[in-house]
Amino acid sequence: MATEERTKEILKMLHTAVCNFEEDDVVKWSKIALEEGVDPFMATMEGLADGMMEAGEKYNKKEYFVPELLMCADALYAGLGILKPAIEVSGRKSEVKGSIVLGVVEGDVHDIGKNLVKLMFEVAGWTVYDLGKDVPLDKFVEEQIRTESNVVGISALMTTSMLSMPEVIKRLRAKNPKVRIMIGGAPVNPEVAEKYGADGYAKDAGTAVDEAMRLLKMLKEEELKK
Ligand code: B1M
């Protein structure tokens, strides 16, 4: 079991390797993290995902451009390939197993965060219908009807693409007033979620499943009242 100091060092190495798009190093440090007993979810979020955040800051400062970001994303996914099975093994299975339609809204190709959210639902034993990225608005509605999922999760990473969220929510409700809708992504916050008429919001992958469980509970309680 790694000491606190060693854990910090491993997280830092993962962070730096993603940010410097050193895929081989990401693989190496992901394996070390597992060998030394670092929590794989922590390694993913506080190592890999944090490294991606720093890459974003470099992009803001014009030190990085789109090609560098893509190489950072490749490095992150190389690490996730190693850590994901361990997260699945260590994951807590929730008692309530719902199903969720998940996707990144039209006009937006940022899917790293959505994929981490998906991973957490899978780990918790949910059935995930992943629509991917740049999803046409009606596709969310069609997939919810096809799969009869209780929850729909919509992700957006841009202040421009998030503007489509209220329209998706409106169309989903028009077809199925009972569906529960949660939204997330960097430009989204609880106030935006309320303004857009979503039922729920999660700040990150670590809290997304709990929020969906809250929505399911709400739905069940409403049904019992009838
Ligand atoms: Co670009 N991009 N990008 N990008 N990119 C941003 C989002 C940006 C903020 C960078 C910046 O300018 N500072 C900016 C958007 C500005 C705005 O808001 N208007 C931007 C831009 C402008 C662009 C392009 C237009 C650039 C160009 O081409 N000139 C272009 C857009 C293309 C398009 O979508 N149409 C573009 C392209 C790209 C890449 C393809 C190169 C790449 C994406 C690769 C991929 O995803 N496969 C990329 C990246 C990597 C970023 C940044 C640097 C990092 C995003 C990321 O992966 N973060 C980003 C800057 C930033 O965010 N700081 C930026 C790591 C990830 C783990 O976090 O996605 O926030 P995040 O997910 C979190 C939470 O948000 C939450 O949980 C996740 C995990 O904890 N969450 C949910 C997410 N979805 C959720 C759903 C939920 C609940 C929680 O429930 C349903």
Image (cartoon, rainbow, N blue to C red):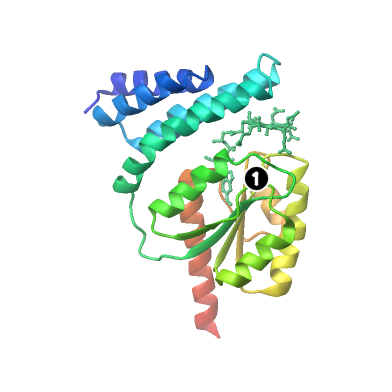
Q: Which corner quadrant holds the N terminus?
A: top left
**Above or below, 137 relative to 110:** below
Q: Give 218 or 133, whichever is nearer the viewer.
A: 133
Q: Which corner quadrant holds the C terminus?
A: bottom right
Question: Callout 1, which amino acid?
Answer: Asn
Q: In this view, does 6 lie to the left or right of 124?
A: left
Q: In this view, does 119 lie to the left or right of 89?
A: right
- Residue 145 on image: x %, y %: 62, 72
Q: Residues within 10 Å of mark 1 (few under 14, many from 20)?
A: some
**Above or below, 38 relative to 173:** above
Residue with the mark numbered 1: 189
Look at 46% across and 19% down and name the residue there.
17
Is residue 88 among what the camera can see? Answer: yes
Quadrant of the image occupied by residue 80: top left
Look at 52% across and 16% down and name the residue there.
20
Q: How many marks?
A: 1
Is residue 179 among what the camera can see? Answer: no
Q: Give 200 or 225, whichever is nearer the viewer.
A: 200
